[in-house]
Image: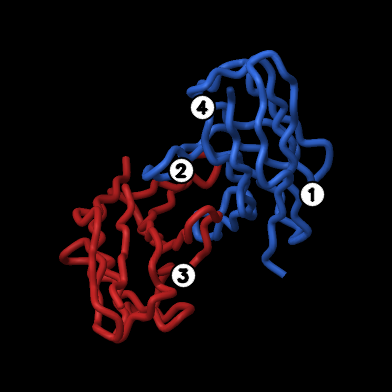
Chain colours: A blue, B red
């Protein structure tokens, strides 16, 4: 099974709201990633968790707060977002520290900030 | 540092015709290359990957790619396309930087014309 699931599929929120995105995988992968993808652009890396510890933060604003409660789950907490944060948010997983390993992507959450 | 170039932003092709999507890379170390496909409003799906061994790699949905070290290319081909192949295609290269860093090309939109 190479499935990564993400909920919700769509999310509309105001700039004062607090919401969370959820990602789950059961492939035994110990690295999980959050990407942001704007229309007609490739995915941009936001965060990397390796063995449930945050290892990379690509200078992401603090209004995005990741959390990895266990090896299968990855959350992205959202607070006080801006309209320019509207995008497709993709989660991925892989074995950590393996250049030859494949990242498997979830279907994404389409976020609209009003 | 590694980089990926997809020179064609859009490729229109008639149904049942062959197609080639071009990808060139630059790397100073061993290369691990991937092609991902993204259907509208969906996440990324792995088409195929080159890690080592045979330079001709076969993937899902009838796609194949050939690794050419001298030309630093990894072009994607399909002998006969179907309407359902209409999607965005991303070439990617991975490297180890304490985590698996994937660098994506800018993508090629394959538009299959009936």
Asked if the residue at tag 2 contacts the one at tag 3, i.e. Cβ–Cβ closer than 8 Å, the answer is no
- The answer to whether residue A73 is above or below residue B79 is above
Q: Label 4 belongs to which residue?
A: A58
Work out how far the residue at label 4 is from the one at label 2, CA to CA, in angstroms.
Answer: 13 Å
The N terminus of chain B sits in image quarter: top left
Percent from the top left, x then y, of residue B35?
A: 40, 63
Secondary-structure class at tag 3: strand
Q: Nearer the viewer, mark 3 or mark 1?
A: 3
- Which chain is disc 4 placed on? A
The structure residue drawn at horizontal position 65% and vertical position 20%, both measured from the top left corner, is A14
Q: Earlier in the sequence, mark 4 or mark 2?
A: 2
**Residue assigned mark 2:** A43
Q: Earlier in the sequence, mark 2 or mark 1?
A: 2
**Chain letter of disc 1 in the image:** A
- Single out the mark in the foreground, 3 or 4: 3
Residue at 59% across, 54% down:
A105
Query: In the image, is residue A114 above or below residue A7?
Result: above
Q: Which of the pair B43/B77 is nearer the observer?
A: B43
**Viewer-closest of A25 and A38:** A38
Which x, y percent locates residue A49?
66, 38
Among all residues in the image, which is located at the extreme front? B114
Q: Could you tell me which secondary element the residue under label 4 belongs to?
A: loop
| Residue that label 1 marks | A72
Which is nearer the eye, B58 or A15? Answer: A15
Report the side of B41 relative to A74 (left or right). Answer: left
The residue pinned by badge 3 equals B47
Nearer to us: label 4 or label 2: 2
Marks 3 and 1 sit apart, C-alpha to C-alpha, by 24 Å
């Amino acid at each position: 099974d190479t499935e990564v699931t993400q909920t919700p599929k769509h999310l509309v929120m105001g700039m004062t709201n607090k919401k969370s995105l959820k990602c789950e995988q059961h492939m035994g992968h110990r690295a999980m990633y959050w990407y942001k993808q704007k229309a007609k652009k490739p995915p941009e890396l936001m965060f990397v968790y390796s063995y449930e510890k945050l290892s990379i933060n690509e200078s992401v604003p603090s209004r995005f707060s990741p959390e990895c409660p266990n090896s299968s789950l990855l959350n992205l907490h959202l607070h006080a977002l801006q309209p320019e944060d509207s995008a497709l948010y993709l989660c991925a997983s892989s074995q950590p520290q393996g250049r030859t390993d494949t990242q498997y992507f979830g279907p994404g959450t389409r976020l609209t900030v009003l | 540092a590694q980089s990926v170039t997809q020179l064609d932003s859009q490729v229109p092709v008639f149904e049942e015709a062959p197609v080639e999507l071009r990808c060139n890379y630059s790397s100073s170390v061993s290369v691990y290359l991937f092609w991902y496909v993204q259907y509208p409003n969906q996440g990324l799906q792995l088409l195929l990957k080159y890690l080592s061994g045979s330079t001709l790699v076969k993937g899902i949905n009838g796609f194949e790619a050939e690794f050419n070290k001298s030309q630093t290319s990894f072009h994607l081909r399909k002998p006969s396309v179907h309407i359902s192949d209409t999607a965005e295609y991303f070439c990617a290269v991975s490297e180890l930087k304490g985590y698996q860093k994937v660098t994506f090309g800018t993508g090629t939109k394959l538009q299959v014309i009936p």
